[in-house]
Structure formats: structure tokens, C-alpha cells
Amino acid sequence: MSIHAPPAAGTAPVTLPRLRDMAARGEKIAMLTAYDATFAQVLDAAGVDVLLVGDSLGNVIQGQPSTLPVALEHMAYHTACVARGLAQAGGRAFLVADMPFGSYEAGPQLAFESAVTLMRAGAQMVKLEGGGPIVDCVRFLVDRGIPVCAHLGLTPQRVHALGGFRVQGRDDAAAAVLKADAAALAAAGAALLVLELVPAPLAREITQAHPGLATIGIGAGAGTSGQVLVLQDMLGLTHRPSGKVPRFVRDFTRVPASAADAPGLTVRQAVQAYVAAVKDGSFPDDAIHAF
Ligand code: KIV
């Protein structure tokens, strides 16, 4: 039994052509992570356009220090949970699943087999991290009818190679590599591109350079086609060992954000506030992204 009413009649499902159209018209795309059926229904009912079964589940569900221990079976299990929740709710949102560390880097054939597992679990698109070395995988999947979301900037599966969770593309040389990677991924057929922790002007430039590619920012300023946050972060539930939450995160259970002692919102209200803020451009605030 569904715990939430299905979306109102006439609320058409979000499809890939519709996401492209939203990006072309400048309607911001609201994306959040989801890992289970109940939250999938809450997020869908609150108007989130895209649900991402992120491998951040390694951190927020499994309690791991990074996303590296997440296996393909874990991703398939949580993707199926979210897909069932969406189906029960008469789901409107588009469902993207992360390809975990080790499930694609060895080449297109491995990437295809892993992507098939996630699509069979209910994903409508898969997400891969990285640029140049995975462009062939992206083209191989797209040519075989599997929609792809790419992910550049801070790519958490490469946290050790990058030397930590830090802003990417700060100097001219690094920015040039990011721009070249975005162009190669767009040419290979990626339809969405997550840009994580990159300077706002660079994210805006990449977005403007590729009208056919919908960019989704996280810590990348307001100039992208849409935004994504980790659900637990935007509900103010994340407790990191360092005690620090990234400065691009906003706790949407507190509105206005500055009124720390104001009564909290329900989860559904907080998610609705997130969707509204993404759509009207009041989240994120470019000023805090002046890296
Ligand atoms: O795994 C994840 O949740 C992600 C988002 C933070 C973009 O990749």
C-alpha cells in the first residue's frame, strides 16, 4: 500500500526528452538522492524531477568512510527499492542509478554488463564518474540505448587520486581539462552531466557551451541546468566525523535558513522547499561558491 497519494492527474512522467526540453527552456531541474521506497514516494510527491540512487549510499546508508566499498549488488538492490516505491506512487520522477567503483573502468563491455544490471533493477539512466578515460564507455552505452549521466569535478570514487574532497578546476590548466572532458562526454552522447565542487563561473561556462547537455550542479553555483543534493544533507541529518557539512549544503528543514531556532518543517515540506528554491533560482546562492 502506498503511503502517499499518487501525483495529480496530468502530471506527466519526467522523461529524457522532457529533461532536455527543461534545460533548453531554462526550467531548473530539481534532483535529489533516494535510496528506498518510502523516500522515493515522498520525493516524487514533493515534485522532485530526478531521483538519483547515488553511491553516496556507502556513506549515508552503510556508514562507510567513502563510496569505494559500494558494490554493484548494493546499487541494484537500492535501485529496485526506489523503483518499486516510484511505481507504487504512480511515479513521475526520472530514475538515475550510479555505477559504483570498479563496475565500468575496465572498459565498455564491463560497463555495459553493469549498466544492464541497473537498468533491469529499474534505472532509466546510469551515472559514471570521470572524463577522458571513460568516454568510450559512455559512447558504447549510449549507442546501445542506455542513457548516461556523466560526472565531472570532484569525483568521489577517485578521492584518493585527487588527494581529498576539494574543489576541482581552479587553475587555468585544470579548467581546460574539465572543459575538454565535458565536450568529449557531450559528443559521446551523455545527456546529463553532474558538476561537483567546481567554481561557479566554470560550471556556467560549461553549461552555456553545451545546450544539448543538461548540467546538474552540486557545489557548482547557480549557473547549471539543475541542482542535486544528498537527501540526508538537505534534511540536516548528516553527521560527519569532522562535524563539518560542506558549505554548499542547505538544511531545508530550517526555513529561512538563518532562523536556526525556528520550528522545523516536515520532510515533505522541506523537499518541497528545496524544489521551489531550485526552480526559482534562490538555491544555490552563487556568493558562497566564489571559490
Ligand atoms: O553519489 C551521489 O550521491 C552523487 C551525488 C552527490 C551527485 O554522486
Image (spheres, rainbow, N blue to C red):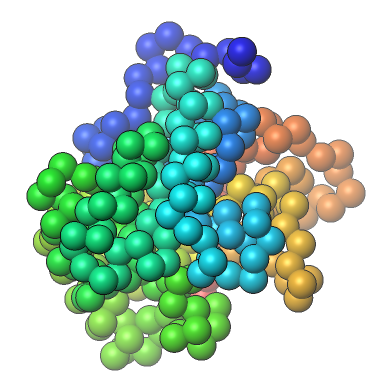
- Image position of 222 with respect to 197: above or below: above
User: Which quarter of the rendering shows the N terminus?
Assistant: top right
At a point 21% along the width and 45% down the height, the residue shown is 146
Above or below: residue 271 compared with residue 139? above
Q: Is residue 256 visible?
A: no
- 51 in relation to 207, above or below: above
Residue 213: image location, x then y, percent: 23, 53
| Any part of residue 18 in sight | yes
**Residue at left 75%, top 33%?**
266
Q: Nearer the viewer, residue 14 or 133?
A: 133
Q: How many marks?
A: 0
Q: Nearer the viewer, residue 269 or 114?
A: 114
Q: Whole-percent x and y of residue 162?
A: 45, 85
Residue that sits furthest to the top in the current view: 9
Residue placed furthest toward the right: 261
Q: Position of residue 147 (x, y in %)?
A: 23, 45
Name the one closer to the observer, 247 or 244.
Answer: 244
Indicate left or right for 190 with 103 as reference: left
Q: Position of residue 87 (x, y in %)?
A: 45, 21
- On the rendered structure, is 140 left or right of 258? left
Identify which residue is drawn at 70% across, 35% down.
Answer: 267
182, above or below 111, in the image: below
For residue 183, side relative to residue 19 (left or right):
left
